[in-house]
Image: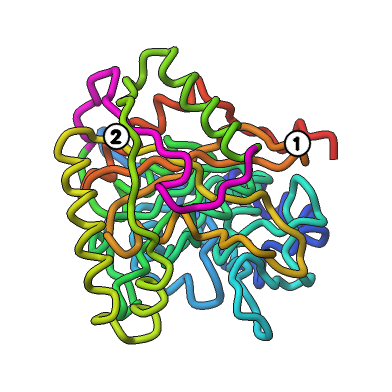
Amino acid sequence: MTAAVAEALGRIARLDPALSAFVEVWPDAARAAAAPARTAPPDGADGPPLSGVPFAVKGPAGVRSYAAGRLRASGAVPVGSTAVPGPGTHWQTWGIGAHGVTRNPWRPDRTPGGSSAGSAVAVATGMVPLATGSDGAGSVRIPAAWCGVLGLRTTAGLLPSPDRTGLASAGVLAAGAAEAQAYLRSATGACAPSLPVFPVPAVWSADLGFADVDDEVERVARRAVERMAAAGLVRLDATSYDLLDPCDAWLAVRGGDPDAATSVRAENDHRLASLFGRTPLLLTPVTPNRPHGHAGPGKRYSTALTWAFNLSGHPAASIPAGFDPDGCPVGLQMVAAHGQDASLLEMARAAETVVHRTDWSASPR
């Protein structure tokens, strides 16, 4: 068994009883899968690119997903399935694992976000360096933001998805951009992209023209953007940027009535096409709100700033931006044109050098 898999299993055994990130853990299968990684490839031959790297899969069925299969083919080792929402609630910003409600590792009285709840917690606490997720309204980006990790929702159609509505795309929760890039290369077989030319033209929008955003969330996200600009990574367009509120349109598509969403989708698609025709990057907070308690999300939709891009199909990432006054992470959302997933991760990797990167192990819990 590789040292990385042994370490992952050890951290899960120590930490998961308090956090409940996992539904199941597969120590025997992980040890068996990791054993070939101990054998060096023949001279001159390259081993699998992710040989012996432990990862987690979202939910009980996650190990059968296309992305998980591609990771396994690249030598990565699945160690368990992570918590997702359970029965009895209509909202998705929580998880139920083997030890009960999934807890935010920064503040156990708060939710980690969802629906990829356990995946985000497992990555944030170093149980695994990456985990699969899926994102139909923000289900990768929201827990990534609230747990302080990187989360990528891929371009619609880039990877197979069982969601017939077309809203959900495969994604990844990762310790950083490098790990997310390894996931993307393994899942798609794509070569490394050309490096962005800095500064990258970018547009900042605190609320997309309609969302009710918490002042502290906006402040933290905006400060991260200012650090990127000061470091020469982005050149901000001073114009404001608005979309139509996608709430009713998203609900209509999810409810099986896509015709009711036609006008809003068409207008937002037009606005986004115009935007990405002149600038490669849109920046917003990930959520309008801070992580809420386990009883429910309150009056703000956590998805208010994310689900527009599920309707439009654009790739979008969450990177750590800093902390709110409650001691919880805040995420900065980065959105790019269709198919620019690899370039988006290159920009996220550059941003990591100047924007706050969380370290849960140093948190005064």
Q: Nearer the viewer, residue 315 or 158?
A: 315
**Residue at horizontal 51%, vertical 64%?**
57
Q: Is residue 165 above or below residue 112?
A: below
- Judging from the image, what secondary structure is the residue with disc 2 in? loop
Counting the numbered discs, the total is 2
Residue that badge 1 annotates: 325
Q: Amino acid at mark 1?
A: Pro
In the displayed structure image, the side of residue 95 where residue 184 appears, left or right: left
- Residue 152's place in the image compared with 115, above or below, is above
Asked if the stretch drawn in magenta spans residue 300, the answer is no
Magenta region, main secondary structure: loop
In the image: residue 8, left or right of residue 195? right
Q: What percent of the width, then of the height, locates residue 40?
A: 41, 41
Which amino acid type is shown beneath numbered disc 2? Asp
* Residue 267 drawn above or below residue 361: below
Q: Is residue 108 visible from the viewing direction of this image?
A: yes
Asked if the residue at tag 1 contacts the one at tag 2, i.e. Cβ–Cβ closer than 8 Å, the answer is no
Question: Can you give x and y, in whole percent of width and height, for residue 229 in the image?
Answer: 41, 18
**Relative to residue 141, is residue 214 drawn left or right?**
right
Q: CA distance from mark 2 to mark 1?
A: 54 Å
Q: Mark number for residue 62?
A: none
What percent of the width, then of the height, locates residue 256? Answer: 34, 86
**Does the rendering let one see residue 31?**
no
Q: In this view of the protein, which residue sits in the foreground, 184 or 45?
A: 184
* Element type where label 1 sits in the image: loop
Q: Which residues are magenta?
A: 192-215
Disc 1 crowd rating (10 Å Cα; few below 14, some 14-19, many 20+) is: few
Question: Which residue corresponds to mark 2?
Answer: 43
Query: What's the residue at 65%, 72% (across, down)?
Result: 24
| Residue under the image location 24 percent in, 25 percent down | 196
Residue 263 drawn at (x, y percent): 23, 70
